Amino acid sequence: MQEQYLADPKSGPCPFYEVGDKFIFERYGGEDTFWREGNGTQCAEAWDCISRYIYTALQGGSIMRGWTNDERMMIACCNDGTRPVIFRIERQDYLAVKINGMSCEKCAERVKTALESVKMVERVEVRLEKGWAEVFVRRDAPPEEEALREAVEGAGYSVAGID
């Protein structure tokens, strides 16, 4: 198609994205990276095609319910007819565990280790500057909130809330 229709018949693959690129968009606690990160940082053609999927995922929804084998997974493609890019868009569900008493990286590591030991937790990212931990949950069932509280308290901190 490139050789037949483009002014540059050897334009090759998409120059903007690389296989394996990851982009994280968040909406929680006053953060809304959809507008800040998406605006001007993505290829305009691709962004036009994938932004509605990302926005839907940030709202906790899925455009492809019943189409993909996991409702948190969406597949989209940019409109470039000669060098399209296929995107996997995944909604990453997590619980925000607000923690009192964390003041340093060592505190954050203790909390992370404690929360990672809870059954049904896939991974934990502690946001020390925000005072919370993002607890990413298994797809089949979230952990019990009481187990999360006990883990944090066992590490010597208290839980201010879980969203």
Image (cartoon, helix red, strand yellow):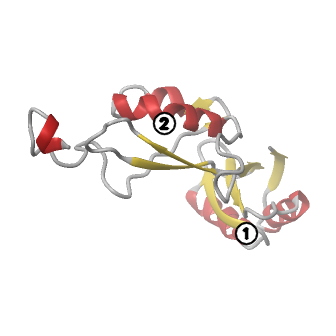
Q: Earlier in the sequence, mark 1 or mark 2?
A: 2
The C terminus, quarter of image: top right
Identified by mark 2, the residue type is Ile
Q: In the displayed structure, would residue 133 be above or below residue 35?
A: below
Q: Quadrant of residue 64?
A: top right
Q: Which residue is mark 2?
A: 50
Q: In the displayed structure, would residue 156 be above or below residue 2?
A: below
Q: Secondary structure at mark 1?
A: helix
What's the residue at 13%, 40% (across, down)?
A: 4
The answer, for residue 124, to whether it is visible in the render is: yes
What's the residue at 61%, 49% (across, down)?
A: 128
Left or right of 145 on screen, residue 76: left
Q: Secondary structure at mark 2?
A: helix
The N terminus, quarter of image: top left
Left or right of 104 on screen, residue 9: left
Q: Name the foreground residue: 148 vs 34.
A: 34
What's the residue at 68%, 34% (across, down)?
A: 29
| Neighbour tally class for label 1: few under 14, some 14-19, many 20 plus, Cα within 10 Å | some
Q: Which residue is mark 1?
A: 114
Identified by mark 1, the residue type is Ala
